[in-house]
Amino acid sequence: MIKGLHHNAYRCRDSEETRRFYEDFLGLPLAKTLEIGTTKTGRETQALHTFYRLGDGSYLAFFEVPGQAFEFKTQHDYDLHIALEVPPEALDELLARGKAAGIETRGPADHAFIDSIYFRDPNGYVIELTAKRPEHAAMMDPATNGAREKLDAWQKAKTEAAE
């Protein structure tokens, strides 16, 4: 039934500031802009919805909604991060570009099956750029990697610790 991800949507402070990061820095083309004046339930609003196309045809999308309260906070990686795949040879170049542009950067990080670098976008979101290693497919195969067994063991340990 589910064919894939069409888009993930997040709030943004300023649509142009967000465009500069995602289009000018990351190279994701602005594909669509939708101005919303009335919601589907008939509520008056003022929102701009922007979509940035990824290489697989899916999108990252953002809503700028002036006057509507939203707490923009610096996100911790565990709370929220957006991971985008890049070819391995792009990591060093993008890390250097980020540092040269004054963007908060971290990495590279060795995760055994992927290598990653990290940026913070203008809204506080952590953006992970990740490159697959040759062993990625094998390490992500639940038939051989024990994913379900590890989850079950985690749940059991949590339950026992709480008792």
Image: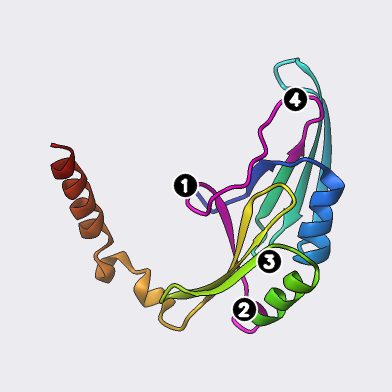
The residue pinned by badge 4 equals 68
What residue range appears in magenta? 63-91
For residue 77, above or below residue 84: above
The residue pinned by badge 1 equals 1
Callout 4: few (<14), some (14-19), or many (20+) C-alpha neighbours within 10 Å? few
Circle on res. 87: 2
Pick whichever of labels 3 and 1 is earlier in the sequence: 1
**Which amino acid does the dot numbered 3 rest on?**
Gly
Pick whichever of labels 1 and 4 is earlier in the sequence: 1
The nearer-to-camera label among 3 and 2 is: 2
**Which amino acid does the dot numbered 4 rest on?**
Gln
Q: CA distance from mark 4 to mark 2?
A: 38 Å
The residue tagged with tag 4: helix, strand or loop?
loop
Q: Residue at x 79, y 65 (%)?
A: 25
Q: How many circles with numbers are drawn on the protein?
A: 4
Residue 73 horizontal side relative to residue 27, left or right: left
Task: Provide the major secondary structure of the magenta segment.
Answer: loop
The residue pinned by badge 3 equals 55
